[in-house]
Amino acid sequence: MVKYAFSRLLAVIPILFILSVLAFSLMHMAHGDPAVAMYGGNTEKMRESDRERIRENLGLNQPLPVQYFKWLSQAVQGNLGLSYLDGRPVTQIIRERIPATLLLSFTGVALMVILSLFFGVVSAVRQYSLFDHATTVISFLLFSIPSFWLALVLILLFSVQLGWLPSAGMYSLGKQGNWLDLLHHLILPALVLAVSHLGGYIRFLRSSMLEVLNQDYIKVARAKGIPKKIIIYIHVLYNALLPFVTYLGLSLPSFFAGTFVVEVVFSWPGMGQLAMDAARDRNYSLLMGSILFSGVLVVCYNLLADLICFLLDPRIRQREIEGHWRDIGVQ
Amino acid sequence: MSSKNKFWQRMNKHGMARLGLAILLILIALSLLAPFLTPYEPTEVDLYAVDQGPSWTHPLGTDNLGRDVLSRCLYGGRVSLSVGFAAVGVSLVVGILYGASSGFVGGWLDRILMGIVDGLLALPNILLVVAFYLFLEPGLASVVLVIGGTSWMQVARLVRTQFFSLKQQDFIQAARVLATPNLKIIIRHLLPNCFVSIMVISIINIGHAIITESTLSFLGLGIPQHEPSWGNMLMGGQMTLLNGSWWQTVFPGLFIVFTVLSINFLGDAIRDALDVRR
């Protein structure tokens, strides 16, 4: 277990390195003077020497590798610099936004897993039934719908026409901290997030269920007279879930991207909204911080998915044990 | 010849493919023939007809500046479709060059190049797109570059994997033995064998590119506001959504959904038809 976790952790290091280089170079290659971001239109009236001083204070006149390593040593200590716009530490701003994003994305993932389990399992068990065909058509349709448009249509339906659900924000005015109100605000964004990604997961689960159904050990279980329900829900589903968990881990970046867009549509005060605002304001330090944070978050999720797979799948454990034997010279 | 016939047979059997192709061709024709189909210019402002619902004079209604939604949808199709196709073109050029060098050279170069791809794929795509976009002047060409420049990773991976397995095969070994120049091996022997899988992935990518373009424009980071595009229209639609002006949101969105749906149908059918395992 520890060895497996460690090897996965080692594999992540190059990814993190590339991520950091990417985030750093993005900020430095971007055109646009940080002085403009700090002082807006007033920059025009500034003297050249003052501009130069600002650049010097920000350390922008040193060679790039030096800047990178300075930045990196600060970054691993949690210091990502100050936001150009309001001068507050980037890490602090992001930390304020993380809970909202985590809440939304976890609820979305949970909802999505529940829905895809239901549709995937039923349509695999009743292959070629009306339900199966309908599910296929719907999941195809969901593939082709941009999530923000789905959000707009649902707002139109549930907020504007029916007036059931709020269309924006996390709390109503004066109800900060009221969890019922939070839940009320959470329904639409989480639903959009789940439904807009559902198509791929349903199709994936359906096909991996069907694959397992054709395996020999399922035939053996049937021959032994084990009740069909137990076969499906214990033997088939359990084995079909393994690739599903891996797929879930691999597709998390796109799920995160979905969260970001949904946050913007629903004015959900999370990291996505923050990053988009930072991009629009050309607030590079904040944007870079958001990119780095979300990249690290995704990498952590991937590790988590790997470990869950390890715990669930004896075949991976077996492979590790065999590898261990090979290492110590036993064939 | 016979395998080609079988290909078309399978394609024909696939009703979805025909449907997808038909819808796509209709949408392309609609956007090309836009000037003949609607009397209004897409940018024609009519302040006496602001926020009007669907009617005989404006079949899909008007937006908050009194511009005709139908003609904006049709002209918007030109922008969205051409961005989709062009962006995939860019991603193909980058992806093939990248994947081919990684797969052909192999070794440490391959490890570094694929590490970079892994790093890029670990990021939420939209962040990459937004960050990249900040380098460029806002405009159509930038949108194409950005979407193409952030969606080549899958193509690169595919080409690299195919090169790796093809390199082991006898005909490549034979070409090597005959001292064929490397470039010729790549262009004449390796790339043609990747063509089919590249095509399938590219068709699906066109749909993705169209969705990404509309998302970017919706966020106000894509096609400049004065140009009609489906994403831009939705951005405008969001502002009047709470007044109940549903037509400004529903219709441009339906154009996107139908376009992407038809492309996905087509891509799926082609993948099925070309699947050698059948």
Image (spheres, coloured by chain):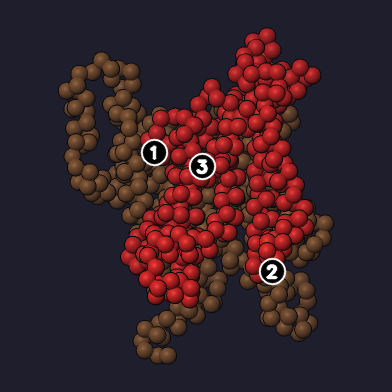
Chain colours: A brown, B red
In this image, A177 relative to A134: left or right?
left
Callout 3 environment at 10 Å: few (<14), some (14 to 19), or many (20+)?
A: many
Nearest to the observer: residue A146 or residue B91: B91
Q: Where is residue A177? Give x, y as percent.
A: 53, 37
Q: Can I make out residue A195 in this image?
A: no
User: The residue marked by circle 3 belongs to what chain?
Assistant: B
Q: Are marks 2 and 1 in contact (CB under 8 Å)?
A: no
Q: Amino acid at mark 3?
A: Ala
Residue A69 location, x and y as percent?
A: 23, 49
Q: In this figure, which residue is indicated by the disc labeled 3? A: B87
Image depth: mark 2 or mark 1 in front: 2
Chain letter for mark 2:
B
Q: Secondary structure at mark 1?
A: helix
Farthest residue to the right: give it.
Answer: A130
Q: Residue furthest bottom?
A: A330
Q: Residue at x 72, y 58 (%)?
A: B8
> What residue would you read off at disc 1?
A287
- Residue where numbered disc 2 is placed: B278
Q: Looking at the picture, how far across and down is residue A97, in whole percent?
A: 45, 40
Helix, strand or loop for disc 2: loop
Q: Amino acid at mark 2?
A: Arg
Residue B77 image offset from top left, x and y in percent: 63, 32
Q: Earlier in the sequence, mark 2 or mark 3?
A: 3
- Cα–Cα gap, marks 1 and 3: 24 Å
Q: Is residue A261 above or below residue A280?
A: below
| Same-chain status of marks 2 and 3 | yes
